[in-house]
Amino acid sequence: ELKVEQNPLFLSMQEGKNYTIYCNYSTTSDRLYWYRQDPGKSLESLFVLLSNGAVKQEGRLMASLDTKARLNTLHITAAVHDLSATYFCAVERAWGGSEKLVFGKGTKLTVNP
Amino acid sequence: DVKVTQSSRYLVKRTGEKVFLECVQDMDHENMFWYRQDPGLGLRLIYFSYDVKMKEKGDIPEGYSVSREKKERFSLILESASTNQTSMYLCASSLWPSAMAPLHFGNGTRLTVT
């Protein structure tokens, strides 16, 4: 059974600081995703990572994938208040020819001025 | 832009009622999914469908059923609502195969069962 562990679950940081959110998963997968959820809103796709060593960056967020270590990370550089949200990693699991995502529990990020 | 529309934003039902949650997507996606989101538990997959009239159980299908009569519409049915089904329900769709095709989520239905 695929398990996805995300940490930390809560993160409070000051503007301008850097931090990393970690996502470990228990079985082999080559497709990982990051989503963002603002309070009261639905999930929005941020990144799709498809191979070992894949790195994607958008603005102050950078996602990277190490399939050998089964580790997916989301690095935040020089955080700003607008990044406050809950971030979910998700791992794709093959099941009878269809692909489905298993989500981590989410990291609630609060960026303080 | 892909649009996934859930028919109700908030819903309050009584224990034992039959509840229908509707979801429509406008991008001709093959895959459609129903998740529930609970604090501390993240998102859990209830059911998914990869084609019309096709459905597969997810991780927590008990107490739920689904219907997909048309490609664009995927309904979640609570046969006899119970208080432990109080939750946020999220519908999503994606292309098949799903490589490089993330899920597109609706805005969610917050269901309260009293």
Image: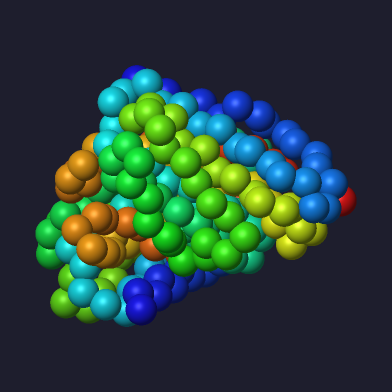
Query: Looking at the image, which residue is at 44% across and 73% down?
Result: A5
Left or right: residue B86 compared with residue B93 = right
Question: Is residue B105 or residue A111 the one in the foreground?
Answer: B105
Q: Quadrant of residue B101?
A: top left
What's the coloring here? rainbow
Q: How many marks?
A: 0
Position of residue B53 relative to residue A65, above or below, is above
Q: Is residue B9 visible?
A: yes
Query: Residue B43 placed where, x, y %?
Result: 52, 57
Query: Looking at the image, which residue is at 38% across and 68% down?
Result: A23
Position of residue A74 relative to residue B109, above or below, is below
Left or right: residue B13 compared with residue B69 = right
Question: Is residue B87 or residue A56 the one in the foreground?
Answer: B87
Q: Is residue A64 visible?
A: no
Query: Residue B64 placed where, x, y %?
Result: 58, 55
Q: Quadrant of the N terminus of chain A?
A: bottom left
Query: Looking at the image, which residue is at 69% across and 42% down?
Result: B19
Question: Is residue B80 or residue A27 the one in the foreground?
Answer: B80
Query: Residue A71 placed where, x, y %?
Result: 28, 71
Q: Quadrant of the C terminus of chain A?
A: top right
Left or right: residue A22 compared with residue B13 = left
Query: Residue A75 placed where, x, y %?
Result: 36, 56
Query: Looking at the image, which residue is at 24% across and 55% down?
Result: A98
Question: Is residue B73 or residue A106 the one in the foreground?
Answer: B73
Q: Quadrant of residue A6?
A: bottom left
